Amino acid sequence: MDFKTAYGNISIDPIEKKVSGSVRYIFELKQVIDTIKIDAQKMVVTNVKINNKTVKFTNNGKTINLFEGFTIGKNTVAFNYEATPKQTMYFNGDFSSESLSNQQVWTQGQGKYTSHWFPSFDDVNEKVVFNLNISFDKKYQVLSNGVLLNEYPNKNEMIWEYQMQKPMSSYLLAIAIGDFRHQVVASKTGIPLQLFIQTKDTAKFEATYRYSKQIFDYLETEIGVKYPWKIYKQIPVEDFLYAGMENTSATIFSEDFVVDAIGFNDRNYVNVNAHELAHQWFGDLVTAKSGKHHWLQEGFATYYALLAERQIFGDDYFYHQLYRSSLQLRNAARTDTIPVMNEKASTFSFYQKGAWALHLIRETIGPKLFQKAVINYLKKYQFQNAETDDFLTEIRKVSDFDTETFKKVWLEDYRFRSDEANALLKKNEFIRTLFETQKMRLKPFVENKERFKELLQSNVFYPVKTEILYQMKDVPFEDKKELLFLALQTNDVKVRQSVAEFTDEIPLEFKANYETLLEDASYDTKEIAFMNLWKNFPESRTIYLDKAQNWIGGNDKSLRSLFLTFSIENQSPEKEKYYNELVDYTSSKYESSVRQNAIINALAVNENDLTVLKNLLNATTHYKWQFTKFARDKIRELLAGGAKPQFQMIYQTLSEKEKAQLDKLLEEKK
């Protein structure tokens, strides 16, 4: 049997955190079977009709089981449902508030979990043309896969009608709701690129989406197959669980990558942008048949993202990224013995080793033949599923590449082929220089000094210069000061950051030069330099606080937290006001990264603050596992330090969920 098309009419209640509506599927029955199953996790399902006739069905809490009313050929099934999803659909912010701030609803169906909010198919091999009508408060923007056909007013709500033209796996179905604005850019081939951003972040639009059109145009040309969908949207959401997710025609990504011009130098969206876009072909257009072949999605997306970055940042950047991942893969292979072609392989293997495997093929047979094989592969399996041998067959058709040996050593063996990798890396002059510079670790500084000086004054890519600064970190200041001045004069953000990082003790004669790092276009550099200057020059602390008083930092407000904490420590006249601001940042009004920074700093100031402890307990109920883990570990640490009475004092003020979490942690303590 084959499910062809889905029509969903759904309404989302963000107060009750529920989704309800009706679904109609058109499907074709190819042979006689006794039961048809639709995945539906913990849903209430009613009014089931097949071919417009009410039928009996069973619902076991995981699947809707249909066993009557269907015949060979074309059929329809329609029903109503209601769900309170415990995962896959997430609700941010307070929707009972009249003011728009951080309220959002978004989905994340990685793998097979869309069936928690929409009755669908956990099997990635069942591809369907999805069409959704979504009813929600008209104050917000509602986004989903495909083209927005219409918006219908419905009292205080709006119905957004989205349509797809081609089939896709259920895990790629998505919704994102929030206070968004957007700009539209047209690709070279006329595809509308809709770039969304929260209203509060509009000043960060350019830096966030820098190079987006260039990436799109490059990948379409490099892959050699036209972008397979009618539109492409990108939507940042708060507290997203991953970096990004390649929902068909609508990538959702983490607010962490919404940056200003300074933040761009520390962490930018370029790689994730290219990675998720590449998935529109590798994963969305052609989907791996099973987890064993997952590298066909992640390896390709990782590699094409690197190729796109090469186009933007140059060859040296490209080779440096490959070099870094080669070191990590070599080290990982010491303990990770699961090969790429195994559904239990690590994320790192699927992504980075998969990318390296593709790089080896492309370098061996050449870019033109590689592209030809990729085009044939994508066209042959478009809107279908494929496995590793399907791709390797296309490689064999265009070349005499030994796919059998390749498969054994790169995909079925856990070890990383460092010798082969290094031979490919050494094609690049910068990498050869980096390797030579690393070998200089074996010689005394005095023998290397002139060469170091020469390299610091050259145009060689920055990692060579940061390697020199690393090698000099324990050299006496008098011996290396000329080189430190040269490093600062490069005006390279990364090189100057290494000066900040590798200089623990700052001599008085270097103080003024080191202080210039506080002006650098990098929040990371500012933080490192501030902390180091604070430690080295207690007499200048007030000056440093004056300089930092308007700092905010990235989305995690790290520099603001730093300023508040150090002002309190320095007995600022406004320390009470600053402490209250810091405590406010621990509350659920803010993203987890802001809260985590603030909790750490507020507890360092006063580990008995009951408001902070309550907000810390609230963090244990958050949906983001990284944040809940931090919160539980912090509570364990506080309990071990004797904080049980303080937690008992706030017990009655906690929600039932918070009480349950605290009870578990107290039980562990026994």
Image (tube, grey):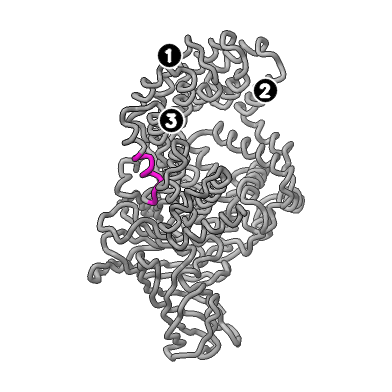
The quarter of the rendered structure image containing the N terminus is bottom right
Part of the protein shown in magenta: 580-588
How far apart are the two marked residues, 1 and 3, measured between alpha carbons? 18 Å
**Towards the viewer: 103 or 505:** 505
Q: Residues within 10 Å of mark 1 (few under 14, many from 20)?
A: few
Of the residues shown, which amino acid type is indicated by label 3? Ser
**Could you say which quadrant of the image residue 442 lies in?**
top right
Give the residue pinned by disc 1: 512
Tell me the residue that label 3 is attached to.
522
Q: In the depicted view, which residue is nearer to us: 213 or 599?
A: 599
527 or 142: nearer the viewer:
527
Foreground tag (1 vs 3): 1
Residue occupied by mark 2: 436
Label 1: state its secondary structure: helix
Q: Where is residue 246 in the image (x, y as percent from the top left)?
A: 49, 56
Q: Where residue 639 appears, x then y in whole percent? A: 55, 47
Disc 1 from disc 2: Cα separation:
33 Å
